[in-house]
Amino acid sequence: MRPLTPPARNPYWRFLLAGFRGQSAYPLATLAGLVANATFGVLKGSIMGAAVESSGGELAGYTAGSMAAFVWLGQGLLGSVNLWGGSDLQTRIKSGDVAVDFLRPVSVQASHVLTDVGKGLFGLLPRGLPSVLIGVAIGGMVLPSDPSAYALGLISLLLGIAVSHACIYAVGTSGFWLVESRGVAVFYLSFSGLFAGLYTPIYLFPDWLLTLALLTPFPSMMQLPVDVLSGQVTGVAAWQHLGVQALWLAIVLAVGHLSTRAGRRRLEVQGG
Amino acid sequence: MAEALRAYRAVVASRARSQASHRASFRMDLVGALLVGIIEFGEIWVLYSATDQIGGFTLAQIMLVFGLSDLAFSLADLVAGHCDNLPLYVRAGTLDVFFLRPQPVLAQLVTSDLSLRRIGRCLVGATSLTVGLVLNDIEWTAGAVGLVVLALVCGFVIFTAQFVTAAGLQFFLVNGAEMTNAFVYGGRYAATQPTSVWPRSLLVVFGAVFPVAFAAFLPVSTLLGVPGVAGLPVWLGWCAPVAAVWAVVVAGLSWRWGLRHYRGAGG
């Protein structure tokens, strides 16, 4: 038997690792997710490809190859970001389990967000990479030739995953006031996909809708990382993307922090 | 049959009473379902507004397709959508109770949970269909009316069969429940697309195996006289009942096969 590892000096690293490892325990679920993901990808790829073709080979700056990259990178990211609005925190507030979280000598926000980011990072292996491989093999996806696209892209990807889970946490804290926050999750779910660029690139939107989308953190979760990673955006513009993402990360983390502090005083756990 | 229908009516009525008693929550669920539907239409609107047409279909024409398929899917979801809960019942052992009662297991599953909030979703499809019927230049013969009604009924049957097929497969998948999303929810997405943009693989999967192309797109292309699939006749949309029968046969086989495979959760 392996000796028990001593308590880590930094428990937060453990949360990240636990989230990562927890996901690897369900290989069939992961395969199932990939099948569903790939089916949607082929459907989305064919309609978006046809849209580019009917616009004469170029649509809002996308060619057939870069549109395929948009589709398949987006599909690959789906397992790593949370666009459906529900969270562990939400369930634990409703059941009262969150009281236990507050007793632990670690930050509630950091432990939840880091566990989810760990899960998200794991999702890149069984979902992200295969999606990209499928995209290249059958989707006609073009990979960027510039190595800096990959370097900046990975940072952007990490920021995107972090923004998504930090945002979900902040949304989940609404449960301190509402208890049943399912309505908030449904509201989140309806806008997140559209504004994150899950269905079409947000650059296809009419101006007013694009402005509206850019005023939310959603593009930072998917559209911006996909832009950078696919090499659609390079140089100064890519750095600008990273800056916008970092700004949103700071904002959603701050909101989550403040609402946890305020909500903690509101928390009333029923039963015994 | 009359006996079964009376039981179903009693379940629906009790569900309606219980769900309407939490008024605020029910209203919010209705609004939520409506919002999700509107945004989904928004995506189609964005895409078809950014281009003139896709696969030979304009925004007005695709509104017909979206309306028809979304309405049919929402109705099927209302009646059979909770078949998705089967893995939960299997894991919790609730399903074993179903076997003890003197009613078919599928009938009990279908009446187990009826979410009336899904009605909100039907409104979006119905509106899009109505607007589509007004915007497009359709010659209103008896045949045209018949085709729209036929498509709606067959679409409903096809999507309901899809839910049951998925439920049958769940007995094998359990933890891999998401796999069936590929053709249930993927099928809903596919049904809103022009089949003319599909590669051959998608034509086989969503035109033949899970025949959602017959739920809306092919009947609409027949109605408008626009060929749906290159090389196939325009009247293909009239074959929707054949597709519906096929979907029901597949669902029946899948459900029986799954049920026979089930050995209990041992609880």
Image (spheres, coloured by chain):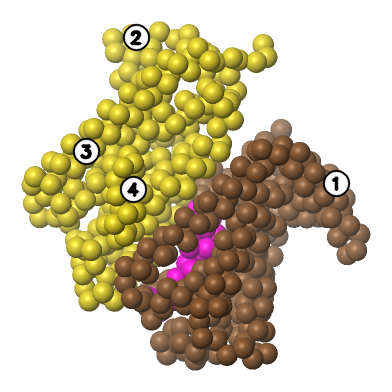
Chain colours: A yellow, B brown
Task: Specify start and end residues of the magenta stretch as a single range.
Answer: B179-197
What amino acid type is highlighted by mark number 3? Val
Q: Marks 1 and 3, how far apart in space?
A: 59 Å
Residue at the extreme front of the image, as rendered: A208
Residue at mark 1: B101
Taking depth in this image into account, of B120 and B180 the one nearest to the observer is B120
The disc label shown at residue A212, or none: 4
Q: Please give the chain letter of the residue carrying mark 3.
A: A
Q: Nearer the viewer, mark 2 or mark 3?
A: 3
Q: Residues within 10 Å of mark 3 (few under 14, many from 20)?
A: some
Query: Which of pointers 1 and 3 indicates the residue nearer the eye?
Result: 3
Cα separation, mark 4 vs mark 3, equals 15 Å
Crowd rating for badge 1 (residues with CA inside 10 Å; few <14, some 14–19, many 20+):
few
**In this orientation, which residue lies closer to the viewer: A76 or A83?**
A83
Q: Do labels 1 and 4 share a chain?
A: no
- Chain name for mark 2: A
Mark 3: which secondary structure?
A: helix
Quadrant in which the C terminus of chain A is drawn: top right
Q: Mark 2 points at which residue?
A: A7
- The image shows residue A167 at horizontal and vertical percentages of 37, 33
